[in-house]
Every structure is written in structure tokens, then in C-alpha cells.
């Protein structure tokens, strides 16, 4: 062994001589400090390891960071590490990365499969979860040092753990020498394993070993008292002379006691780890961390505080980003009182301001909840200015809000000056948003939605469809395109730092989602899907996302005003002994909500779920509500007791209903085609049951429809009218007694109407809601359009003719269909202000994604003065060949 070492040392001396005579030696030695703002997971550095390809792994008390020429990627417990506090890192011969953690055992990253596996005392024979040191020998055996139970070895090939009888319980460090024999440092000296026994080095004695550094074929030992040793012929010899470690420390102005780990890479750069980051000593070849581009944040439905970033739901996200050196800005002025396209214009202007301030060419967008719809309105219309790199959309109802549709419709009624409420409806999403627009092919989309049923303590969500407790997974993931990436985690829609007896996570608080999905994507400009550094665990619960969004089956919504100090009791009839969710919604004030079951049992309000009753009390950005989940709710009459406890001087509206897990439900079928004001508009409804239907239960059903009509002036209150629906064959309802109920109503004006259908049978009551649009005759399309293709073939320009009788805000959308398959291959949406008269509206279409072939063009004209509705359409406005 001595001869082998001697030859290696001669080689190193020769290499050192050649390097000192090379031109690079003339470069001045300098140092650079790297911290979290540069991309490290944390500032307190605990470990360093280098892969054969030259990339580095840095362990910190807040995670591990992989540093390569292309990116800086961090991993934490949110990715699957046993603990974010990393104590040791080792690179295995098979390329896997092993992490020792402070209290979570050992985790292994497979960079090929992008999976993390953790060994702890619950799933393996590892002797402790408190890991202090790691080393891997050429046979791929992992030596594991622990804080409280000595040392063990894991044979990867045999999947076998070996616990050694070791003189000390606490291990501080492990290093393998030239013969791959382990040297184990402890608080009472250093020991070498000769294959049978642990032999203590006499020179180090009982010194407290801080670390052993190995590089360039040499081994250096340092104690906590600053004593330094070098390994010679299996003995540690005191080393008081200057060496590379001391020289590098001096160059970085560091004292020995400040260094927590040390490494030298293949570019002869020295990595000195400290509690304040990495001090890198180099000769002009320090790595350059990726420079994050600015992020513009688009808030959810409501405007928080004074409409600033500091008071918005993003305030925690901003603090995380500041710490990690990622610049964030806020689209101030986005409001529920604006339409989607008015908000899109505000986003456009904020991006332009940020670009001017920072000098960036593009930004990243993060849209939360309704903010995702506003983000799409900008990206997918002619307002877009080619200035967005990627859009991260969190908890956004791409197909509308279905789970809480009854509450949403109450919001529409109570806030007629907020078009955003109606823009969240499933009908608007289906008829307007997803029929006129498509994902911008030049922007990366990441859709993230939570299935909060996976979180501990939220068992009451088990009776609900997969959702973040507000938006269903199916709705959030209903957007499809090659550049749209879909992700499901366990987040709630929204949650703040309130004191709770168990941990809850949401998209914006605490740090888990930031670390798992957002930080790396915003740090590195590689456009990899968010969170793609680790693949999702295959053992998660089913997430959905492929089917239709769920529909609500509930009793009719009852709304009544309640004064301060007043108690109101409402009764509701349940007809199935199944799960029931009792909901009370009150956008203002405070209500204590209690229940009395048919057998007299009383359910009292509680802030959090109870195991027995499943009580829920949450606030969201859509509404304030309280609710109970009662499994196997007894059939009969229930009492809902509402006690207003705030001291407000004005009555408040309180709405109640019961969501049912029952086979009997009502379907409402408003006429699917647009009608003009003043003409009959048919409304249909049907009571459906599981097969075979209970005919007796469906006899003598009374069906009514309450219709909320928009005011003549946008923003004013709806007016309510009532019509009865019949199954007699005389009211546009088909054949008599066929189960289909119907009747006509005559809409007095154009706009969006709300229809509330109520069915009352012998032993049941059900309700359902729908939104319908009535055409105006303010404008129409010319039936012939022209199509021109630019010389470079990258853009198609469609010229659409319009005739308008009223000046206002309009939009023209174009759909391009393949003549051979009739599939839509592209969409474009152009908001425009038009005066009275004849106009030509140019509609640009990105042609780079359209293959050669024959195509037809369909056009639609919309009013944008409030929530958009269709005015006219031309199914075959033009044809062209590409």
C-alpha cells in the first residue's frame, strides 16, 4: 500500500509543479460567497460532495442543493427527504446520492428514475434516525454513523444492515482511506476498522474529531480545538504547517473553527462551508448561479387589504422569494369588479412596468384561484405582448366552480357589480372561456391543484369529490394542450398561519409547496415542469382530472336576512340515510350554526373537524361559511339553528342548504342555444334517480323555477320572477307524464340570467342552478371573412367584418378547423372597442403550430361590457389552404 501511495504522491507533486508554471498561476486567488439568495437551500452548510461529472451537492440545515453548470436545484423534506436538515452526503458508485439527515434517517436519490427512498427505524434495521456521517465503499456498501447508536453498514446488493459493536455511541464523521477501510471520528478520538476490530489512533487520542477531509489522495483530520492531523501510513500525524485547507481558509478570511465542511473540486476550486454560506476560493472560475427572471403575481377573486403585495394572500410567498433571491411583483388593480379582459389589460400594463424597471425581456406569472383565469385572459387574447416565459396556475377552476356552485350563485346575486362571480360559473367556463380560447402555444403552463383529502385531520373531505376543498381536481385540470403540465398535491385552497392542532398546507402557506413546486422552477429558466426534479409518489390517492367536473346534488338554497342577536331556525327534510353536508353561508357578519337531528341529538359549532361528527368551519376567498358533515344522517326533519353573534347594525343575508350523497337529484336544462330578448325561452328540468327508479317517489312532484333577471344597467340588482314547470305535454315539455318538466319565460333584455329550479315530492326536496345567456341585437358579423398568411408562414391574419348598432366593448374570436377531421387546431380572441357602424377587425393567429392542409374558419362575436356573452356566430366564415 505504501508503494502505491508513494507513486500517487509523486504524481501529485509533478502535477502541482506543472500547474505553478502554467499561465493560470498568474491569476489572483479570490473568493466568492454563495447563500440562499444565489440558490442554496439554506445558509448553514453541513456537507459537500462531488459527482464524477464535476457537479456538486451541498447539504444545509434546510435541504440539499445540486449545483451544475445548467441549474441549481434544491431538495427538501417536501420532495421526500427524511428531513430537510442534511448532515452528510455521499455519492455511490451506481450514481445514486445518499443523504444523512438530522432526524429522518437516510434518504437516497435515484437521479435516473427521479425518486427518493428513505430508510428509517420504522421501515428498516437502521440503528437510528439521527444520522451524522456517511461513506460508501467501492462495493456499494454504505457506512452510516449515528448520533446515538454508533455505526452500521448497509449492503445495497443484499439489502442487509450490519450493526457494529463500536466503542462510542456518537459518531461525528466517517472517511474511507486508500484501502477503503473506514476511519470513524467521534467525540473521543478516531477509530479505524481493520475488518475485525476497531483500533483507536493514539496520536489523536481522545480529541473531539470535527471532520475528516479527503482530496487529492490525502486525508486531513481536524478537531474541535483546532488541532490538525494528516494521515501517513495508517497513522494520524500532527500537522502544524500550512496546507491547502489552511491556505484556502486564509484566502477566504476564515478561521478554522468557522468551517463546517471542506471540499476541492476538479477545477481546483475550494469549497469552504460555513454557517453563513459557501466561501469559494477560486482563480476567476467561480460558478454563475442562474439569474431568476421577475415574477408577477395575480391574486384570487377578492382584493385583500389595500390591494398591495404586503397585504395580499401572496405575502408569505413574497417572504420566501425574497430570501431565495427571486424578485416578485404584484398586479395591483386586478378586481372582481372588472371583467376578465379588463383585468388582463391591467396584467399587461404591470408586466410592461416590471420589464422597464428590471430590464427583463419576459416575466413568469403566478395566478392563484380566479387569478389563473385572469392570467389566461391575458395570455390567450390579442392583448398578449410576447412577454411571459411561463404561467403557474394554482387552484384555478378551468371548468368553473361546481362543488360550491350554490354558494357561487348566491354571490352572483348579492354582488351584481362583480362580473368575476359569473365568470367563475361552469356555464361561463364552457360557453365562453373554453370555447373561444386555447392555451398560448408559446408559453409553458403548469396547473397545480390539491386533493386535500390526503391531509391528516381532514376526513370530512372524504365525502366530497377530489378537491382542494373549494375547486375540484377535475375542473382545475380540464385544460389540455401539449404545453400544459398538470400536477396534483394535497394542498388546501387557502390557509393562513392560524394556530391549529395539526399541520395544514396550502398553495401559499407554509413553505412546502414553495419548496416542492415553485422555488426551483422560478430559480432556473429551463422551462422544466414545476416539481419535475422528483416524480410523484405512485401511492397517492386517485386525483381525477380526466372526467367531467362533479355536479352538486342538494336541497334548495334558502336565503333570509338575520339581525344582530337574532336566532333563526330552519327545517330541512332528508330522504336518504347517507352522508349529508349542512352548509350555512354568510358573506358578512358572524353566525353560530347548530344542528338538531330528527332524534333530538344536537351538533354544536366547532372550529375544526371532530372525529364523531365531522364539523367544518372554514373561510375561503369565495365565501364565509360553516358546515357539518354527518355520515349516515338519519332520515327525517332536521333543524338548522342560526344565531347571529356580531354587533352589526344592518341585517345580513344567510343562505342554507344541504349537500346530499343520494341517488335522487334534479337536472336543469335551460335551452342550449342563444335567444333574443322578447322571445320565449324554454326551461326544462327532470328528477332523476338510480336505476330502477322509484315511480311512487316521483309522483305529484311540484317543479318551479325562480329566474334572476339582470338589470337594465350593469351592476344593479337582479330581479326575481317565478314560473311553474309542468309535465303535461302543453308547456313545451315533450310528452305528458314523461318526467320532463318545462315552460317558457320571456327575457326582457340581453345578458346573463340565473335559473334556480326547485322540486318538491312526497318525501324529498331538491334544488339546482343554471346560468343562461340571452343575445342582444346590438351587433352582428359579416358572413364573409378574408384570410392572409404572412410570407414567412408564421402568422395568419383573419379580417372579420362587423356591424354595430351600439358603441361599446366587444370581442371577435376565431376558430380554425381542419377540413379533414373537423378538429379545432387554433383559436384567437381579440377584444376591441367599436363605435356604431361597419368595422373590420383583424384577428392574428399563430400559424407555427398549424400543419399544411385545408382549413375552415368559424367566427363568434361577443359583448364585453360585463361578463361576456355571445351576440352572433358564423360557422363557415372563410376557407384557406396552408
Image (cartoon, rainbow, N blue to C red):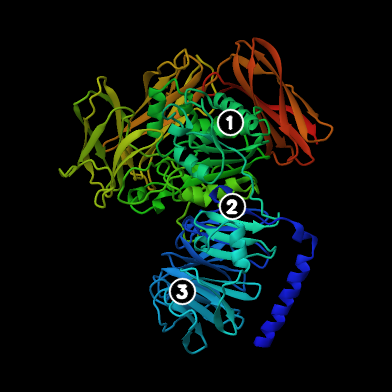
Residue at image mark 1: 377
* Position in image of residue 541 (x %, y %): 45, 56
Please identify the quarter of the rendering in which residue 859 is found. top right
Check the image and name the residue furthest to the right.
Answer: 791
Looking at this view, is 100 or 155 the one in front?
A: 100
Q: Dividing the image into 4 quarters, which one contains the C terminus?
A: top right
- Label 3 secondary element: strand
Q: Residues within 10 Å of mark 3 (few under 14, many from 20)?
A: many
Q: Residues within 10 Å of mark 1 (few under 14, many from 20)?
A: many
Looking at this view, is 724 or 842 the one in front?
A: 842
Dot placed on the residue nearer the N-terminal end, 3 or 2:
2
Residue at image mark 3: 145
Query: Looking at the picture, does residue 853 appear above or below residue 654?
Result: below
Q: CA distance from mark 3 to mark 2?
A: 30 Å
Please identify the quarter of the rendering in which residue 329 is found. top right
Residue at image mark 2: 33
* Position in image of residue 226 (x %, y %): 49, 68
Q: Say which residue appears at 54% left-offset and 40% top-offset.
A: 393
Circle 1 or circle 3, nearest the eye: 3
Check the image and name the residue furthest to the front.
Answer: 241
Q: Are marks 3 and 2 in contact (CB under 8 Å)?
A: no
* Position in image of residue 690 (x %, y %): 38, 46
Amino acid at each position: 500500500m505504501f508503494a502505491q501511495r508513494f507513486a500517487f504522491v509523486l504524481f501529485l507533486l509533478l502535477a502541482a509543479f506543472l500547474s505553478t508554471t502554467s499561465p493560470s498561476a498568474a491569476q489572483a486567488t479570490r473568493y466568492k460567497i454563495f447563500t440562499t439568495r444565489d440558490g442554496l437551500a439554506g445558509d448553514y452548510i453541513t456537507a459537500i460532495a462531488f459527482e464524477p461529472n464535476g457537479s456538486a451537492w451541498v447539504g444545509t440545515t434546510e435541504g440539499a442543493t445540486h449545483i451544475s453548470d445548467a441549474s441549481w436545484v434544491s431538495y427538501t423534506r417536501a420532495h421526500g427527504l427524511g428531513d430537510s436538515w442534511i448532515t452528510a452526503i455521499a455519492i455511490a458508485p451506481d450514481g445514486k446520492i445518499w443523504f444523512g439527515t438530522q432526524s429522518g434517517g437516510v434518504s437516497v436519490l435515484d437521479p435516473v428514475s427521479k425518486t427518493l427512498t428513505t430508510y428509517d427505524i420504522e421501515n428498516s434495521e437502521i440503528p437510528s434516525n439521527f444520522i451524522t456521517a456517511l461513506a460508501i465503499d467501492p462495493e456499494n456498501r454504505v457506512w452510516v454513523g449515528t448520533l446515538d447508536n454508533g455505526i452500521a453498514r448497509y449492503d445495497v446488493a443484499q439489502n442487509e444492515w450490519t450493526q457494529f459493536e463500536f466503542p462510542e455511541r456518537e459518531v461525528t464523521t466517517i472517511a474511507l482511506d486508500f484501502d477503503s477501510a473506514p476511519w470513524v471520528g467521534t467525540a473521543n478520538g478516531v477509530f479505524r476498522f481493520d475488518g475485525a476490530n476497531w483500533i483507536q489512533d493514539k496520536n489523536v487520542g481522545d480529541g473531539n474529531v470535527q471532520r475528516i477531509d479527503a482530496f487529492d489522495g490525502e486525508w486531513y483530520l481536524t478537531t474541535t480545538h483546532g488541532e490538525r492531523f494528516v494521515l501517513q501510513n495508517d497513522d494520524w500525524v500532527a500537522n502544524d504547517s500550512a496546507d491547502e485547507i489552511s491556505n484556502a481558509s486564509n484566502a477566504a478570511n476564515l478561521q478554522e473553527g468557522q468551517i463546517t465542511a471542506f471540499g476541492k473540486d476538479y477545477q481546483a476550486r475550494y469549497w469552504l462551508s460555513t454557517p453563513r454560506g459557501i466561501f469559494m476560493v477560486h482563480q476567476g472560475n467561480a460558478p454563475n448561479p442562474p439569474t431568476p427572471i421577475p415574477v408577477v403575481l395575480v391574486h384570487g377573486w377578492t382584493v385583500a387589504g389595500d390591494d398591495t403585495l404586503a397585504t395580499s394572500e401572496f405575502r408569505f410567498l413574497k417572504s420566501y422569494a425574497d430570501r431565495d433571491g427571486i424578485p416578485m411583483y404584484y398586479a395591483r388593480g386586478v378586481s372582481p369588479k372588472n371583467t376578465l379582459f379588463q383585468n388582463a389589460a391591467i396584467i399587461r400594463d404591470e408586466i410592461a412596468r416590471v420589464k422597464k424597471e428590471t430590464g427583463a425581456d419576459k416575466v413568469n406569472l403566478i395566478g392563484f384561484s380566479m387569478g389563473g383565469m385572469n392570467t389566461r385572459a391575458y395570455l390567450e387574447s390579442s392583448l398578449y405582448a410576447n412577454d411571459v416565459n411561463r404561467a403557474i396556475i394554482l387552484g384555478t377552476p378551468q371548468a368553473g366552480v361546481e362543488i360550491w356552485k350554490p354558494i357561487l350563485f348566491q354571490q352572483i346575486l348579492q354582488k351584481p357589480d362583480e362580473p368575476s362571480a359569473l365568470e367563475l360559473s361552469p356555464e361561463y367556463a364552457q360557453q365562453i372561456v373554453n370555447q373561444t380560447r386555447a392555451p398560448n402555444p408559446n408559453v409553458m403552463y403548469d396547473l397545480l391543484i390539491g386533493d386535500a383529502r390526503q391531509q391528516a385531520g381532514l376526513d370530512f373531505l372524504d365525502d366530497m369529490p377530489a378537491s382542494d376543498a373549494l375547486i375540484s381536481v377535475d375542473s382545475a385540470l380540464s385544460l389540455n394542450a401539449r404545453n400544459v403540465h398538470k400536477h396534483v398535491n394535497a394542498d388546501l385552497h387557502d390557509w393562513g398561519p392560524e394556530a391549529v392542532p395539526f399541520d395544514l398546507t396550502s398553495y401559499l402557506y407554509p413553505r412546502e409547496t414553495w419548496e416542492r413546486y415553485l422555488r426551483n422552477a422560478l430559480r432556473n429558466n429551463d422551462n422544466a415542469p414545476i416539481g419535475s426534479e422528483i416524480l410523484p409518489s405512485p401511492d397517492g390517492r386517485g386525483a381525477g382530472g380526466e372526467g367531467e367536473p362533479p355536479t352538486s346534488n342538494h336541497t334548495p338554497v334558502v336565503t333570509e336576512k338575520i339581525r344582530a342577536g337574532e336566532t333563526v331556525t330552519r327545517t330541512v327534510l332528508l330522504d336518504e340515510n347517507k352522508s349529508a353536508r349542512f352548509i350555512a353561508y354568510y358573506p358578512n357578519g358572524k353566525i353560530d350554526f347548530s344542528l338538531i337531528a330528527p332524534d333530538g341529538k344536537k351538533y354544536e359549532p366547532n372550529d375544526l373537524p371532530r372525529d364523531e361528527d365531522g364539523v367544518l368551519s372554514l373561510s375561503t376567498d369565495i365565501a364565509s361559511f360553516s358546515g357539518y358533515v354527518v355520515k349516515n344522517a338519519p332520515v327525517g326533519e332536521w333543524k338548522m339553528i342560526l344565531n347571529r353573534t356580531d354587533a352589526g347594525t344592518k341585517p345580513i343575508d344567510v343562505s342554507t342548504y344541504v349537500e346530499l350523497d343520494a341517488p335522487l337529484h334534479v337536472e336543469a336544462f335551460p335551452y342550449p342555444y342563444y335567444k333574443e330578448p322578447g322571445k320565449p325561452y324554454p326551461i326544462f328540468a327532470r328528477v332523476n334517480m338510480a336505476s330502477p327508479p322509484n315511480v311512487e317517489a316521483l309522483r305529484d312532484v311540484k317543479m318551479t323555477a325562480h329566474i334572476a333577471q339582470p338589470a337594465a344597467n350593469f351592476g344593479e340588482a337582479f330581479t326575481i320572477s317565478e314560473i311553474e314547470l309542468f309535465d303535461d305535454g302543453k308547456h313545451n315539455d315533450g310528452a305528458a307524464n314523461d318526467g320532463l318538466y318545462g315552460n317558457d319565460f320571456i327575457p326582457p333584455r340581453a345578458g346573463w340570467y340565473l335559473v334556480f329550479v326547485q322540486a318538491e315530492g312526497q318525501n324529498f326536496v331538491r334544488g339546482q342552478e343554471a346560468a343562461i345567456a340571452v343575445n342582444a341585437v346590438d351587433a352582428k358579423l359579416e358572413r364573409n371573412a378574408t384570410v392572409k398568411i404572412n410570407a414567412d408562414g408564421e402568422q395568419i391574419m383573419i379580417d372579420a367584418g362587423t356591424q354595430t348598432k351600439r358603441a361599446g366593448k366587444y370581442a371577435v374570436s376565431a376558430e380554425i378547423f381542419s377540413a379533414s377531421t373537423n378538429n379545432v387546431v387554433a383559436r384567437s380572441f381579440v377584444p376591441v372597442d367599436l363605435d356604431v357602424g361597419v368595422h373590420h377587425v383583424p384577428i392574428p393567429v399563430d400559424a407555427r403550430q398549424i400543419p399544411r392542409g385545408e382549413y375552415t374558419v368559424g367566427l363568434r362575436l361577443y359583448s364585453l361590457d360585463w361578463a361576456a356573452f355571445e351576440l352572433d356566430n358564423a360557422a363557415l366564415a372563410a376557407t384557406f389552404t396552408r
